[in-house]
Every structure is written in structure tokens, then in C-alpha cells.
Amino acid sequence: MVMKMKYACPCCGYFTFPVPPKDDVGYICPVCFWENDAFISAEDEPSDCNHGMTLLEGRANFKAFGACERSMLIHVRPPKADEQSVE
């Protein structure tokens, strides 16, 4: 069995990304629904991919209610066993 390397989502911390976040644009995490934005240079910089939300806001929202944005709750799923966060 070949195991594929997974990388942590910058928003929720679960290992859902198929490539390093710095190398990917547009991948949407199925656990928090953060759309990766490799062009932001700081956690408090608004993300065009996420309607101007910052990564800090997305993380706070995920901790508060389980998605990067409340309207995205219908799209998220619980993390799988092999996606567990290190936090």
C-alpha cells in the first residue's frame, strides 16, 4: 500500500492538503472549507480567495463553530483518522 503525503491546512491544522500550502492555490480544505491562498504573506492579510477574510479570522471561526465561515458549515466534514491535527 502506497501512502500519499498530506500537509496541514493553514486554517484548521488538519492534514488534508495533497501538496504543501505554499505550492497550491485554490485547494479547499474539506474539514474547515478554507480556500488556500498562497499569495498572502501574513496571517492578518485579507485573502482574495476567502472574500477578504484573514487566516486569523478563519482560524478563530473554525475554533468557534467548526468552519472558516459560518455559511460554509454545510460543506465541511469531520477529519478522517489519517488527517488528525498536531495541535
Image (cartoon, grey):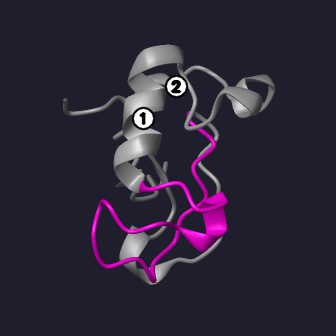
Q: Tags 2 and 1 in contact by the CB under 8 Å rule?
A: yes
Q: Residues within 10 Å of mark 2 (few under 14, many from 20)?
A: few
Residue name at image x 58 percent, y 29 percent? 67
Is 72 on the left-hand or right-hand side of 41? right
Report the span colored magenta: 32-54
Residue farthest along the right direction in this orientation: 74
Tell me if residue 25 comes above or below residue 73 in the rendering. below
Tell me if residue 77 comes above or below residue 44 in the rendering. above
In the image, residue 74 lies at what x, y percent?
Answer: 80, 24
Residue name at image x 61 percent, y 72 percent? 48
In the image, residue 41 lies at what x, y percent?
Answer: 31, 79
**Nearer to us in this view, 42 or 24:** 42
Residue name at image x 52 percent, y 71 percent? 37
In the image, residue 26 lies at what x, y percent?
Answer: 65, 70
Tell me where residue 20 sits by quadrant: bottom left
Residue 68 belongs to the span the image colors magenta: no
Cα separation, mark 2 vs mark 1, equals: 5 Å
Residue designated by label 2: 80
* Kind of residue sitting beneath label 1: Glu
Classify the position of the C terminus by image quarter.
top left
Overall secondary structure of the magenta stretch? loop
Is 35 on the left-hand or right-hand side of 46? right
Residue designated by label 1: 83
* Kind of residue sitting beneath label 2: Lys
- Tell me if I can see residue 77 in this picture: yes
